[in-house]
C-alpha cells in the first residue's frame, strides 16, 4: 500500500517535469485567493492545533514548530 | 530592416527568459484599446519617450504600480512634457472585464491595449509581472524594469527624466 | 488623448484587492516581488465544545468535557524592499474535565472514568518570524514560545525556499526544534504524577511545489520528526490488572508524514477544488491516512462559500489497550483515546466576504470520531473518543 503510494507520487512528479512552462502572464487563475495552499492561514493554524491535540498524527506540508502540553 | 532583425533576434531568444534588452529596437505593439472602441500602436507615439507597461488585474504589484504611474504621468505633463512623454500599457487579463472593473475604481488617463491572448508579451519575452520597458523617440529600448516594489516610482522618475533631458 | 483627471493614490481599498494574489507562494504568482507589500492584521475568535460522553459508558456523574475558546492574531509588516516581520499570537482558555482512565465493567466492557475536578487552564502562544525575499529565494527564521500553567515550550525554526528559473517549481526545506518543560499541577496530591519532566522535538520538512498547467498546482512534502524525553500524559492513568498505574510511553518517537496537495481551478463554476492527502507512520506503530476535500465556490466577486469534508483513520500504538488484564513486560501502558484505533469525519463550511480594505470570515465545523470509522476493524472501542462542534469568526485588515 505504502510502496504503491510512493510510486504514484514519484510518477506524478515525473509527469510534472514534462509540462511546458507557464508564461508569467498566464498565471491569472493560479493567482485566485482560493487557489492558495491555505487561503485562510489562521484557520489552518487552528485546525492543525486542534487535530494535533486530538489525534496521534502530526506533520505535513504546512506544519511549523511549536507544541503544547496536550501531547 | 532593423525591425526584422529585432524580430528574428526575438524569435531566437524565444523560450529563454531573456526580455527584450536595452539597445534593441522595441518590437511592434498594437491592438484594441481596453476602455475605448479604438486601436492604438506604438508607432503612433514615435518621437515621444514611451513607458510600455505589461500588467494584469490579478497581479498584486501591478495594481500597486498603476496609480503610481498615473501620478507620475500627471506630474510630467504638468512639468511641460505633454508631447514628449506617454505611457502605453498592455493589459493581459484573460477576461478584459476584470481589468475594466479595476480601472473603473482606479482610472488612468493613459492608453491601454487589451491583449487577452498574450500575443504581445511573447514578442517582448516578458520575464515577470509586471515588466516595464522605457523606449526613446527612435523606438529603441533604453531601460527595462522587472516587478514593482514600494519605492520603485523613484527609479522610474529618474530614468524617464534622464531620457527626456537628452 | 488625456482627459481631465485627478490622480489617486493607492488606498486601503486597493491594498485589499491585492490581498488575494499576495497570499500565494511566489512561484504561483509570476511576479518578481514576492513579498506582500502592505502591512496587515488579522484576528480570529473560535469556540468549541466537546460533546458530553455517553452516560452508559462513563463511571460517575461527570460526563461533560472541555469547553475551549481561542483568540488568534496575526500581524505582518514589510520592512525595506526585502524584509518582512510577522507576529503570531494565540490565547486559549479551556475549562472542563478530561478522560482519566478506563476500567472494565462486570461484562468486561470499557467504562470511562473522568478526572473529577474541573480543570481550568490557559495557553499563550507567541511566534515571531523574520523573512527575507530574494529574487528566487526566501529565507525565514522564527522563534516562539508556548506557555500554560503547567507547561513551557520554546521553539526555533528555519525555512528556505527556492523557485526554479522558470518559476514553475519551488523547493523548500525547513527545520525546527522545540524544548518543553512540563510541571504537572497537584503532583503532591497525586503520587502517580511526576513533579517535572521535559521533552525535545526536532523536525525536518522538505517540499516540492509545481505548476501543472494554467489551472492546476500540486505539492508534495515529506516531514520527519523525532521526539525524545517524557512523552507520556501526566494526567492520564491506566487500569492494569486491578491496579491503577501512570500512563507510561516510550521515551522516543520517530514520526514520518508524506503529504500531497492538489489545487484545481474550475473556471466554468468560478470555483477551486482542493484535494489533500497525508500518510503518517511512527515508531509506536501508529499509522494514519488523512484525506481532505474542499470546494471553494466564488459567488459574485466578493463572496466565497467553502464546504469541506475530511476523513481521518488511525491504527493504535502497539502498547495501547483500553485496559490491561495483565502487566506488560515492557512496562508501557496507555489508554489514551488519542493512541486508540479509530476514524473521524469532519464536515465544515466557511464563508468569506471581501470588502474594501478588509475581509470577514465565518466558519463552522463538526468533528465526529468513532471506532467503526477506522479503516481496520476495531475490537474494543475506546469510550473516550471525542466529538466537537467548532464555530469561528475572523476579520482581516490591510493597512
Image (cartoon, rainbow, N blue to C red):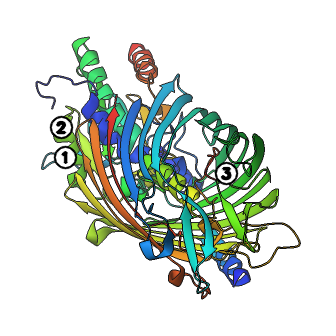
Q: What is the spatial separation of the Cα atoms under label 2 and label 3, in whole angstroms?
A: 38 Å
Contact flag, marks 1 and 2 (Cβ < 8 Å): yes
Left or right: C397 as drawn, with respect to C380: left
Q: Nearer the viewer, residue B93 or C81?
A: C81
Q: Tag 1, which chain?
A: B
Q: What is the spatial separation of the Cα atoms under label 1 and label 3, in whole angstroms?
A: 36 Å
Q: Nearer the viewer, residue B44 or A63?
A: A63
Seen at 78% across and 55% down, the residue is: C226
Q: Is residue C200 above or below residue A32?
A: above
Helix, strand or loop for disc 1: helix
Per the image, the residue denoted by label 2 is B105
Helix, strand or loop for disc 2: helix
Residue C66 position within the rendered picture, expressed as x and y whole percent measured from the top left: 45, 54
Per the image, the residue denoted by label 1 is B101
Residue C34 position within the rendered picture, expressed as x and y whole percent measured from the top left: 51, 40
Per the image, the residue denoted by label 3 is C172
Amino acid at each position: 500500500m505504502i510502496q504503491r503510494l510512493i510510486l504514484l507520487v514519484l510518477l506524478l512528479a515525473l509527469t510534472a517535469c514534462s509540462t511546458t512552462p507557464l508564461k508569467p502572464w498566464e498565471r491569472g487563475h493560479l493567482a485566485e485567493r482560493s487557489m492558495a495552499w491555505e487561503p485562510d492561514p489562521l484557520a489552518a493554524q487552528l485546525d492543525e492545533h486542534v487535530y494535533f491535540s486530538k489525534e496521534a498524527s502530526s506533520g505535513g506540508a504546512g506544519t511549523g514548530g511549536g507544541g503544547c502540553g496536550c501531547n | 530592416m532593423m525591425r526584422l532583425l529585432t524580430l528574428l533576434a526575438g524569435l531566437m531568444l524565444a523560450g529563454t527568459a531573456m526580455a527584450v534588452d536595452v539597445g534593441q529596437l522595441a518590437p511592434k505593439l498594437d491592438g484594441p484599446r481596453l476602455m475605448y472602441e479604438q486601436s492604438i500602436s506604438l508607432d503612433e507615439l514615435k518621437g515621444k519617450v514611451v513607458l510600455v507597461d505589461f500588467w494584469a488585474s490579478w497581479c498584486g504589484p501591478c495594481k500597486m504600480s498603476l496609480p503610481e504611474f498615473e501620478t507620475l504621468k500627471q506630474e510630467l505633463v504638468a512639468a511641460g512634457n505633454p508631447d514628449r512623454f506617454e505611457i502605453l500599457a498592455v493589459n493581459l487579463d484573460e477576461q478584459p472585464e476584470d481589468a475594466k472593473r479595476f480601472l473603473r475604481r482606479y482610472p488612468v488617463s493613459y492608453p491601454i491595449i487589451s491583449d487577452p491572448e498574450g500575443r504581445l508579451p511573447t514578442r517582448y519575452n516578458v520575464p515577470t509581472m509586471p515588466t516595464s520597458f522605457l523606449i526613446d523617440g527612435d523606438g529603441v529600448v533604453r531601460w527595462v524594469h522587472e516587478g514593482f516594489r514600494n519605492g520603485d516610482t523613484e527609479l522610474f522618475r529618474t530614468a524617464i527624466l534622464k531620457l527626456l533631458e537628452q | 488623448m488625456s482627459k481631465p483627471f485627478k490622480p489617486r493614490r493607492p488606498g486601503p481599498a486597493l491594498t485589499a484587492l491585492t490581498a488575494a494574489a499576495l497570499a500565494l507562494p511566489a512561484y504561483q504568482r509570476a511576479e518578481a516581488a514576492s513579498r506582500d507589500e502592505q502591512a496587515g492584521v488579522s484576528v480570529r475568535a473560535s469556540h468549541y465544545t466537546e460533546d458530553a460522553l455517553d452516560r452508559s459508558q462513563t463511571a460517575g456523574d461527570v460526563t461533560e468535557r472541555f469547553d475551549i475558546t481561542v483568540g488568534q492574531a496575526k500581524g505582518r509588516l514589510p520592512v525595506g524592499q526585502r524584509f518582512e516581520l510577522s507576529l503570531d499570537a494565540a490565547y486559549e482558555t479551556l475549562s472542563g474535565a478530561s478522560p482519566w482512565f478506563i476500567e472494565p465493567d462486570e461484562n468486561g466492557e470499557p467504562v470511562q472514568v473522568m478526572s473529577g475536578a474541573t480543570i481550568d487552564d490557559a495557553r499563550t502562544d507567541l511566534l515571531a518570524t523574520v523573512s527575507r525575499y530574494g529574487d528566487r529565494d526566501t529565507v525565514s527564521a522564527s522563534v516562539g514560545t508556548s506557555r500554560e500553567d503547567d507547561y513551557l515550550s520554546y521553539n526555533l525554526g528555519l525555512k528556505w525556499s527556492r523557485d526554479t528559473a522558470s518559476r514553475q517549481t519551488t523547493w523548500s526545506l525547513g527545520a525546527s526544534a522545540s524544548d518543553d518543560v512540563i510541571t504537572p499541577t497537584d503532583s503532591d496530591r497525586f503520587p502517580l504524577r511526576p513533579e517535572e519532566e521535559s521533552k525535545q522535538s526536532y523536525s525536518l520538512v522538505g517540499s516540492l511545489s509545481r505548476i501543472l498547467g494554467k489551472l492546476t498546482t500540486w505539492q508534495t512534502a515529506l516531514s520527519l520528526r523525532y521526539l525524545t524525553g517524557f512523552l507520556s500524559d501526566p494526567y492520564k492513568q491506566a487500569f492494569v490488572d486491578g491496579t491503577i498505574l501512570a500512563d507510561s510511553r516510550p521515551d522516543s518517537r520517530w514520526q514520518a508524514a508524506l503529504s500531497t496537495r492538489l489545487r484545481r481551478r474550475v473556471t466554468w463554476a468560478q470555483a477551486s477544488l482542493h484535494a489533500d492527502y497525508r500518510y503518517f507512520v511512527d515508531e509506536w506503530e501508529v499509522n494514519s491516512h488523512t484525506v481532505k476535500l474542499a470546494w471553494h465556490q466564488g459567488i459574485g466577486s466578493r463572496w466565497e462559500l467553502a464546504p469541506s469534508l475530511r476523513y481521518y483513520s488511525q491504527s493504535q500504538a502497539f502498547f495501547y489497550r483500553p485496559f490491561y488484564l495483565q502487566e506488560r513486560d515492557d512496562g508501557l501502558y496507555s489508554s489514551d483515546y488519542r493512541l486508540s484505533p479509530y476514524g473521524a469525519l469532519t464536515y465544515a463550511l466557511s464563508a468569506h466576504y471581501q470588502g474594501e480594505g478588509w475581509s470577514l470570515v465565518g466558519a463552522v465545523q463538526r468533528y465526529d470520531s468513532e471506532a467503526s470509522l477506522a479503516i481496520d476493524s476495531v475490537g474494543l472501542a475506546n469510550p473516550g473518543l471525542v466529538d466537537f462542534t467548532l464555530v469561528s469568526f475572523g476579520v482581516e485588515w490591510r493597512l
